[in-house]
């Protein structure tokens, strides 16, 4: 529910005054409370002095009376003659006459001769006085039988010291009440005697304030808890130590109620409240009068503000009122002009890329959704995701300002070449999404050709001619999806295919999503497999055609996942290289191979294992050092391990790869070039590499018995390798005819399904013990 301006003004003035009055009242109350607290604390200090003075006066009266008793001739004679009955009668009569609660007669050495209360021994302070040999009277506070007494000891002289007479009055509730009447403060005595613990002896406080106060180990602790309890109830207190000697403690807690002390300020507070209510009434009346005088122009301004809020900026605000409201109307007019301009600018910025001024992802997404919502079955759209492949290289070479200028010119070229209704939007740093009306698969080639024509002419940026290499991935709606994000994701998949396509463009094929998702799942599961070392090594024998037996085996990695099942190396090795965990897998495989070689050596089987390494492995000096150290730590001969690398894997950084490979050579580890013939072979590079073996790729061997071209290539490769001093291994031998041809060509070793498929270490051990007939026949006869 909204409040009118008049009511708001009324509430504001009244509220402001209310807050002011409330703050003033609170300040007065706080100041009065603080003043009363300070006053009460000062009074408690006075009460302490009065309390001590009263106790001192009481002790002086006791001492005067005790001196009268000690000076009585009959009493002295009774002491001198040892008449116990006379002494006891004199003590009792004198004590009753002066209202003494306790009377005691001591010998010169301090032994208790007579006492009205059972006393085992004197307090430490009294005993020290008697033992000192002093003949001066003394007054002390002490505890007898758990009760506080004011004790006066007076020597009996005739003229020698005959003994000591002591009179005491109890500090009990009646005495505290008398003191309370004089000081207007409550008094609580807390005492601690050996064997009794600390507790409250007497108090003028109400039982409710001292209830639940448990005994403690010290009188100070009980007094502190009492003070905390009183503070919670609104009392101020002060501790006064009356007695503190070995085995005895007495603390008096003086307290006064703040509430009673504040009663004198209540009339002032009531007067402040009355004044406040009167002031609030006057303020409300004044605010009501003022609000009525400004209601009409304010309502007009409110209507104008609502119109501006609704986005209607066409009408001007005109008010025939005072200068202040006229200024406000002019300000609102200026505001609506500014808001209109800023709103248009913000809308443009929210929907466009500020560098290229192309629409952004948000804008083209909204356009797509609106078109699809109009008629999702009839609308046919084509979307092309264009990526500038070499833009990053231009940025690295010339800087970001240069690449920004490139993007601006490219955006201008594309925008001017689009048909009416087509849209280009920048959706990433180097990607532009093209939205084509009614584009079908048949029209893609024409679109690609037109875009290529746009990129044919080089851009001139700061005098530097620049040619860009565009890649394009196409999708169609609704065939490939009806949601914008889904289509963009599939366009990214098509763009990834275009990177390896000859024409630099590709159209999404239904089902590529599954491949993409499988790769994501594969990467996730592969990391788990590395953590658990969930890989198995199979071994495929290599048959030496000169020695006519198996001297080497190739270690081949296998992975069976609980979710994905058996995954072939051709599928997971590229993912491992892309995600950067291929080296971790190589470490696991190397560990298993070295362990197996040790087991075979222990069983009397002498084999060399060939291990394939990735290009990423070869480029890491740390991994190369790990291979060498692991081989040396295993105790195996360096000839027990052969490292196989592909001829193209070292092209990323030939200098680093060559330096690391030479470390293998220095350690005595042989190196073999794998898959020779599949890449762009360089005899110059082959010559400078420290390799000892060449493996001809199986693509040249599979059809060797039927393909004359393959025969020529293989024969020349073997001759060239032998000329360079290299051994030659042919992989992919699957029939006897191919094997015989390789023998005739002088090939050194063969490997393939004709001999044996990859197998486990135990199966290989059995295979070596009893080779199949076709393997035995190789050494028995040359031709079948």
Image (cartoon, rainbow, N blue to C red):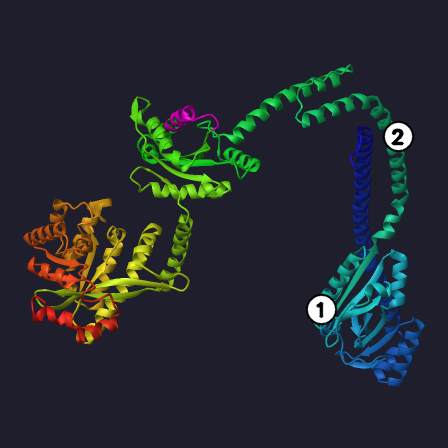
Residue 600 part of the magenta-drawn span: no
Foreground residue among 460 and 59: 460
Tell me if 50 is positioned left or right of 485 in this view: right
Q: Residues within 10 Å of mark 2 (few under 14, many from 20)?
A: few
Q: Residues within 10 Å of mark 1 (few under 14, many from 20)?
A: some
Q: Is residue 685 above or below residue 467?
A: below
Residue receiving disc 2 = 282
Q: Quadrant of the N terminus?
A: top right
- The answer to whether one can see residue 134 in this image is no
Q: Earlier in the sequence, mark 2 or mark 1?
A: 1
Residue drawn at the location 85% of the way across and 70% of the way down = 170
Residue 407 part of the magenta-drawn span: yes
Foreground residue among 338 and 259: 338
Element under disc 2:
helix
Task: Indicate the position of residue 350 as horizontal and vertical percent values.
Answer: 53, 31
Tell me if 757 is positioned left or right of 129 in this view: left
Say which of marks 2 and 1 sits in front.
2
Residue drawn at the location 33% of the way across and 27% of the way down = 453
- The answer to whether one can see residue 729 in this image is yes
CA distance for labels 2 and 1: 62 Å
First to last magenta residue range: 406-421
Q: Quadrant of the C terminus?
A: bottom left
Badge 2 vs badge 1, beta-carbon distance below 8 Å: no
Tell me if 520 is positioned left or right of 348 in this view: left
Q: Is residue 205 above or below residue 780?
A: above
Task: Indicate the position of residue 516 as horizontal and vertical percent values.
Answer: 40, 50
Q: Which mark is residue 115?
A: none
Task: Indicate the position of residue 716 as horizontal and vertical percent values.
Answer: 9, 50
Q: Which mark is residue 218?
A: 1
Element under disc 1:
loop
């Amino acid at each position: 529910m909204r409040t009118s301006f008049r009511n708001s003004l009324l509430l504001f003035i009244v509220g402001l005054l209310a807050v002011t009055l409330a703050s003033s009242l609170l300040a007065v109350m706080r100041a009065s409370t603080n003043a009363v607290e300070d006053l009460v604390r000062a009074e408690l200090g006075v009460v302490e002095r009065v309390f001590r003075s009263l106790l001192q006066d009481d002790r002086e009266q006791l001492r005067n009376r005790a001196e009268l008793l000690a000076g009585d001739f009959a009493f002295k004679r009774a002491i001198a003659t040892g008449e116990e009955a006379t002494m006891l009668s004199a003590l009792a009569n004198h004590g009753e006459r002066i209202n003494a609660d306790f009377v005691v007669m001591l010998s010169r050495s301090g032994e208790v001769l007579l006492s009205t209360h059972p006393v085992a021994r004197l307090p430490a302070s009294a005993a020290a006085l008697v033992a000192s040999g002093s003949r001066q009277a003394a007054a002390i506070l002490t505890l007898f039988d758990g009760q506080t007494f004011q004790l006066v000891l007076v020597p009996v002289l005739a003229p020698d010291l005959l003994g000591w007479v002591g009179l005491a009055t109890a500090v009990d509730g009646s005495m505290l009440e008398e003191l309370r009447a004089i000081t207007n403060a409550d008094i609580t005595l807390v005492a601690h005697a050996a064997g009794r613990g600390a507790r409250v002896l007497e108090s003028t406080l109400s039982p409710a304030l001292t209830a639940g106060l448990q005994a403690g180990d010290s009188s100070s602790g009980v007094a502190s808890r009492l003070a905390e309890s009183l503070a919670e109830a609104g009392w101020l207190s002060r501790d006064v130590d009356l007695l503190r000697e070995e085995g005895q403690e007495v603390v008096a807690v003086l307290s006064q109620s703040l509430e009673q002390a504040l009663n004198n300020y209540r009339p002032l507070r009531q007067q402040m409240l009355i004044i406040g209510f009167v002031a609030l009434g006057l303020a409300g009346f004044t605010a009501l009068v003022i609000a009525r005088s400004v209601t009409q122009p304010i309502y007009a301004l409110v209507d104008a503000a609502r119109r501006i809020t609704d986005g209607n900026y066409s009408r001007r605000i005109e008010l025939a009122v005072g200068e202040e409201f006229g200024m406000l109307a002019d300000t609102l007019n200026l505001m609506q002009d500014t808001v209109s301009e800023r709103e248009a600018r913000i809308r443009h910025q929210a929907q466009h890329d500020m560098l290229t001024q192309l629409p952004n992802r948000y804008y083209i997404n909204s356009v797509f959704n609106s078109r699809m919502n109009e008629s999702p079955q009839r609308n046919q759209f084509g979307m092309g995701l264009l990526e500038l492949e070499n833009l990053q290289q231009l940025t690295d070479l010339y800087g970001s300002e240069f690449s920004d200028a490139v993007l601006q010119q490219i955006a201008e070229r594309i925008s001017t070449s689009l048909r009416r209704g087509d849209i280009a939007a920048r959706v990433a740093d180097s990607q532009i999404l093209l939205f084509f009306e009614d584009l079908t698969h048949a029209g893609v080639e024409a679109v690609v050709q037109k875009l290529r024509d746009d990129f044919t002419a080089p851009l001139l940026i700061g005098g530097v001619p620049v040619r860009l290499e565009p890649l394009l991935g196409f999708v169609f709606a609704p065939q490939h999806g009806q949601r914008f994000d889904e289509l963009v994701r599939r366009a990214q998949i098509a763009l990834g295919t275009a990177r390896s396509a000859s024409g630099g463009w590709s159209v999404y094929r239904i089902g590529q999503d599954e491949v993409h998702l499988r790769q994501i799942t594969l990467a996730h599961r592969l990391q788990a497999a590395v953590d658990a070392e969930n890989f198995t090594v199979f071994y495929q024998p290599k048959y030496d055609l000169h020695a006519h037996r198996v001297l080497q085996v190739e270690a081949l990695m296998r992975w069976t996942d609980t979710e994905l099942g058996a995954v072939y190396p051709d599928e997971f090795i590229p993912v491992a290289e892309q995600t950067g965990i291929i080296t971790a897998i190589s470490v696991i495989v190397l560990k298993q191979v070295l362990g197996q070689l040790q087991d075979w050596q222990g069983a009397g089987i002498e084999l060399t294992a060939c291990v394939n390494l990735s290009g990423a492995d070869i480029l890491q000096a740390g991994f190369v050092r790990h291979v060498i150290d692991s081989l040396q730590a295993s105790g195996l001969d360096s000839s027990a391990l052969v490292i196989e690398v592909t001829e193209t894997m070292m092209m990323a950084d030939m200098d680093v790869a060559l330096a690391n490979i030479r470390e293998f050579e220095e350690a005595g580890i042989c190196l073999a070039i794998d898959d020779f013939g599949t890449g762009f072979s360089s005899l110059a590079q082959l010559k400078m590499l420290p390799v000892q073996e060449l493996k001809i790729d199986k693509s040249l061997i599979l059809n060797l018995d039927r393909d004359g071209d393959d025969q020529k290539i293989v024969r020349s490769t073997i001759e060239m390798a032998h000329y360079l001093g290299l051994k030659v291994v042919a992989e992919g031998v699957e029939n006897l005819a191919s094997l015989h041809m390789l023998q005739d060509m002088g090939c050194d070793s063969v490997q393939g399904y004709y001999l044996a498929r990859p197998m486990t270490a135990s199966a290989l051990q059995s295979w070596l013990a009893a080779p199949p007939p076709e393997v035995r026949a190789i050494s028995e006869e040359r031709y079948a």
